[in-house]
Image (cartoon, rainbow, N blue to C red):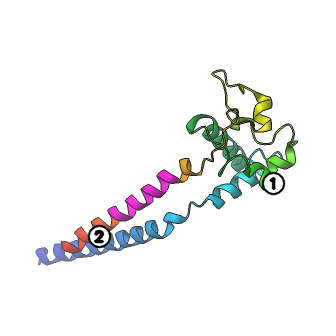
Amino acid sequence: LNSSRNRRRYIILMMIVFAFEVASSITAAVHRDFLTPNLFLRQMLEKYQNPEPVNSDDDWKSAGITRTWNRLMLQVNKCCAVNGPTDWQAYTSIFRTVNNDADYPWPRQCCVMDVQGKAINLDGCKLGVSGYYHNTGCYETIAGPMNRHAWGVAWFGFAVLCWTVGI
């Protein structure tokens, strides 16, 4: 009697684990393409350096997105915007409405900096002279590892699923 009750509990537990593994595998496989350039582009254009947030939540989001983009463009990959610095000019953005195009065609973080954190040639950066600004986008730096991890989660879930069915 005790053995059959334990067996029943084990089967129920395995069915619950099985259901969660199916759900996680499907979710990881379906949402692996969620991180599109347009998602990051929209957030960057709407929130970066927003001086007039609608409410405190929007203020918190704008500040966080601005800090993240600044850190990403300066430290990680020496990149600019999502697809490149032309994102700041080709689309309407908060940054574009706040800053003059002649003074700030893109954020200063897109400029090549010296060890003190100053642009090595600010005029060259503003004019778009090659070597004085970062002309590559940041999308691959952001989404590449996340997409690879999504596939890893999907395959791990599938492997555990196969192992669960085998037991």
How crowded pointer 1 is (Cα within 10 Å; few <14, some 14-19, many 20+) is rated as few
Quadrant for the C terminus, please: bottom left
96 or 13: nearer the viewer: 96
Task: Report which residue position mark 1 lands on.
Answer: 54
Q: Please determine whether, in this image, residue 74 is positioned above or below residue 24.
A: above
For disc 2, the neighbor class at 10 Å (few under 14, some 14 to 19, many from 20) is some
Where residue 14 sits in the image (x, y, percent)? 26, 72
Q: Secondary structure at mark 1?
A: loop
Residue stretch rendered in magenta on the structure: 144-156
In the image, 144 versus 86, the foreground residue is 86
Q: Quadrant of the N terminus?
A: bottom left
Q: Earlier in the sequence, mark 2 or mark 1?
A: 1
Amino acid type at image mark 2: Leu
* Residue at 82% over, 39% down: 104
What's the amino acid at mark 1?
A: Val
| Residue at mark 2 | 161
Foreground pick, 125 / 138: 125
- Circles 2, 1 touching at the beta carbon (< 8 Å): no
Decide if residue 57 is in sight here. Answer: no
Which quadrant would residue 117 be assigned to in this image?
top right
